[in-house]
Amino acid sequence: MAERQNPTERAELARALRSAVRGEVEFGATARALTTMDASNYRRVPLGVVAPRDADDVAAALAVCRAHGVPVVPRGGGTSIAGQATGTGVVLDLTRHLNGILALDPASRTAVVQPGVILDGLRTAAAPHGLTFGPDPSTHSRCTLGGMIGNNSCGAHSVAWGTTADNVHALAVTRYGGDTLRLDRGTVPEALTGLPELIRTHLAPLRTGFPELPRRISGYALDALLPERGTDLARAFCGSEGTLGVVTEATVRLVEAPAARALAVLGYADEAAAAEAAPGLLPYHPLTVEGMAADLVREPAGLPRGAAWLFAETGGATPAEARAHAERILRAADALDGTVVTDPAGQRALWRIREDAAGTATRMPDGTEAWPGWEDCAVPPARLGPYLRDFRALLAGHGLRGTPYGHFGDGCIHVRIDFDLLSTQGVARFRRFSEELADLVVAHGGSLSGEHGDGQARAELLPRMYGDELVALFSRFKDIWDPDGGMNPGILARPARLDENLRFEVLPKRPVDVAFGYPHDGGDFSAAVRRCVGVAKCRTAEPTDTGVMCPSFRATGEEAHSTRGRARLLHEMLAGGAIAGDGRGTGGVITEGWRSTEVRDALDLCLSCKGCRSDCPVGVDMATYKAEFLHHHYRHRLRPAAHYTMGRLPMWLRLASPFAAALNALARVRPLAALAKRLAGVAPERGIPVLARETFTRWLNRRWGKGTFIFSNGEVAMVWPDTFTERLSPEVGRAAVRVLEAAGRHTIPAGRGLCCGLTYVSTGQLDKARTVMRRTLDRLGGTLGTPVVVLEPSCAATLRADLPELLHDDPRAAELASSVRTLAQYLEEYAPDWQPPRLDRPAVGQTHCHQHAVLGDAAERRLRERAGLTGELSGGCCGLAGNFGFERGHWEVSAACAEESLLPSVRAAEPGTEVLADGFSCRTQLEQLGGVRARHLAEVLAQGLTEGPADEREEG
């Protein structure tokens, strides 16, 4: 089928689609760039994207595309790992509207769903009835049921509940051209002319040509159409990867969810030993038998002794029953060491290691990139140990490295391999390895795909697994369904070569000129952008208990406002050739380089919360990428007003500070305040913060007098006079001084005129940021290296992360970064015996997103616990996020972020609950949107200390 790239033809197609469907039809650069890739190594540029509103829209879109001879690719969450969710024609986005649960019947244990339903949404709906959907891939928080059907997804619990195909009763499917078929067991629609004859005349190969193993996902499941298997057309459709038709409705089976669960964690000498032990656990009927080796675990996580581990989850009607089941497995297992975890939080922490593996495995321990492509081969479980040994030997023979992990109980292994997919020689080695690995898998009686489908990564090699006769039947099966070849061509039947359409070939060959150092990516901005492999954890619709990423996506639901979406746009910007200047990238969708309005608009709603820096499994740091982009985009150009006002806030506040009383009075005059906000680019809904009448450092100097104080280094606590503590909330600084002195520390300011450069960084004024940072380092002089307490989390994060990455050529930056401590960190390290006052009351609030992402909050948690402040603080982001929530045009998203977790938790709090927020932005958001005064932890602790008359006089 010919690809239509002619602008006139593309415009005609867009007009025809807009007149035929009620959903959105988007042929612009942004929509196309967002769908060039899935979570694979492949990239194909579509003509446009259609978001159908219902099944009729799907049929209409398919009819138009057939009339115009344009291929169609159905797309769910875009987390496919083999390239099957990319295409050159029209992409059908089935997540935007076709995402309803139409029926849920607890009696029959079935649900009727649309294809865009997120798996976790179905599980949440089924949970009150004690039910769940059995297959649960690690992307359960963002993958769709339609995508799971297309790939025949499995997940960790398939040893108990099978694959998606095992849990599908019936499907409504629309074919290329627009006709809709009902697929179930025992009947073949008349429209599929020739299918009964195809089966009848090829019974022998269909009965003998498919290996028997629990994770055979490769190819079409034609053996499901055998008469002795009930001619199950719905089952045969599962795993067809969008090549036969589009699912518009599915009736699926639900299973009973155990009321309680326990986790037996078993340690082994190596992964082969763990693999050989896995089949022996199956007779005990665990819910899961998952395996991973030490090279996947970057930090100790409370795992038992060993270099590889099995996770065997058990269920029961009560916690005691689940635990007893897990203990039986522990006793029966021939393991080096083991433990049973029953605490839900402990189980979640362990499962998080496993679920994030699809991302963390994309970086080797030394930072080398690793890629999918041979992500999920499966062999009979009894052959898994020998297969892993042969697999490791094959890797070594090609000079490659990988970190296998996965569903050991089903014989299915996931692995990311450090292929060089950037050079001609590296791609050639990728092909040779792929061919030899396919032969190895077949030699062990396995399947090239055990979960994620063949896509472009493996379909070319299907003859090695099935032979030419069965593969020819696959093509005939495809032709019966899709005689025009319009459904996802190049996938499964008559596939593209596995080394074509690689997403890296369009990127610049040379590093582009950038401001940040990107130390974890070899200084290469392209490598930083390549970090996003598309696993889409940023597209999770609900925040995790403590996570942050990605608040703008949760507020808008738009791919362009997810971390992945922005990374895709940056990838296409690099591919456009305008930045590299070397004639490459002519196939890029974004052609204006750093001047791109598409990238600018997508980044506009990025809160720079830094949540992705810690929550993204591969450490995508969109806040840094945004600052980099804004730096280049506005270079030698007029900036938005907010960049000159809020972006240079430290300068303006320093000038305004002597006139604080008068300016505060003027800000209370509504017409003047409205005019000031309009000129400054501030959202009209925002209140103007009150300037402090006395700065923190002036108070501290007045407290001690003007003399010079000399203390031993062991007693001095240097406090960083950040702009917010210094000029907007000095009460926080005063409280911190009291706490530090109670802990036996003499407190002095770190210096005058110091600035971390936060506001300049967040608005992309990186030349100015570097000037400010260097001036700060100069002024610190001989005190560099002395621990410094930074009370504002965003400033602490800037000093810890942005400073050394922006001044990567100045060793003093790294020295200062290593000296930064939060108040809790400082007290824990330098006053470990100090006992905080006992407050003994519940607390709510929010951990600052920058602290979560860069600094961590473990010390704060321990300090709160010692002080008797109970309860968990909210995850997510407050939505103000420094200048973001103040800028005109951001009010709605800012408020939506606050309403997600923070404000509801505060409203639900009992009287007397302490509201904590260490960040000035968080406190301001709570005050302006919730009418609540939140306090820094330092203020709460200071109040709990016994205050003497002298202290009271100093406050006055």
Image (cartoon, helix red, strand yellow):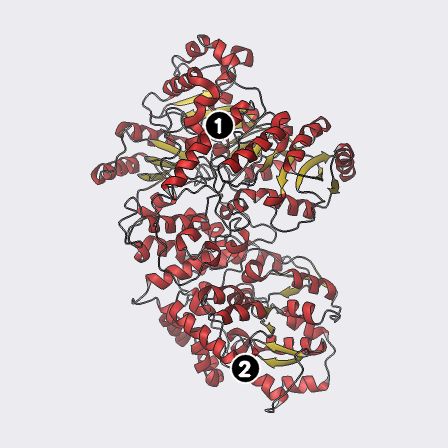
**Of 935 and 780, the residue lying toward us:** 780
What kind of residue is marked 2?
Thr
What kind of residue is marked 1?
Ala
Rendered location of residue 860, percent (x, y)? 65, 63
**Of 818 and 92, the residue lying toward us:** 818
Q: How many C-alpha atoms fall within 10 Å of the one at disc 1: few (<14), some, or many (≥20)?
A: many
323 vs 391, left or right, is: right
371 vs 861, left or right, is: left
If the image is split into quadrants, where does the N terminus sit? top left
Mark 2 or 1: in front is 1
Rendered location of residue 545, percent (x, y)? 61, 51
Q: Quick one: SS at disc 1?
A: helix
Rendered location of residue 425, percent (x, y)? 38, 40
Residue at image x 60%, y 49%? Answer: 298
If the image is split into quadrants, where does the C terminus sit? bottom right
Query: Which residue is label 1 attached to?
Result: 438
| Contact check, label 2 and label 1, Cβ < 8 Å | no
Sequence-first disc among 2 and 1: 1
| Residue 249 shows up from this direction | no
The dot on residue 695 is: 2
Hey, which residue is sitting farthest top in the picture?
A: 201
Vertical placement of residue 143 versus 697, above or below: above
Rendered location of residue 23, percent (x, y)? 36, 39
Vertical placement of residue 612 versus 706, above or below: above
**Residue 98 appears in which quarter of the rendering?**
top left
Q: Quick one: SS at disc 2?
A: loop
Q: CA distance from mark 2 to mark 1?
A: 69 Å
953 vs 196, left or right, is: right
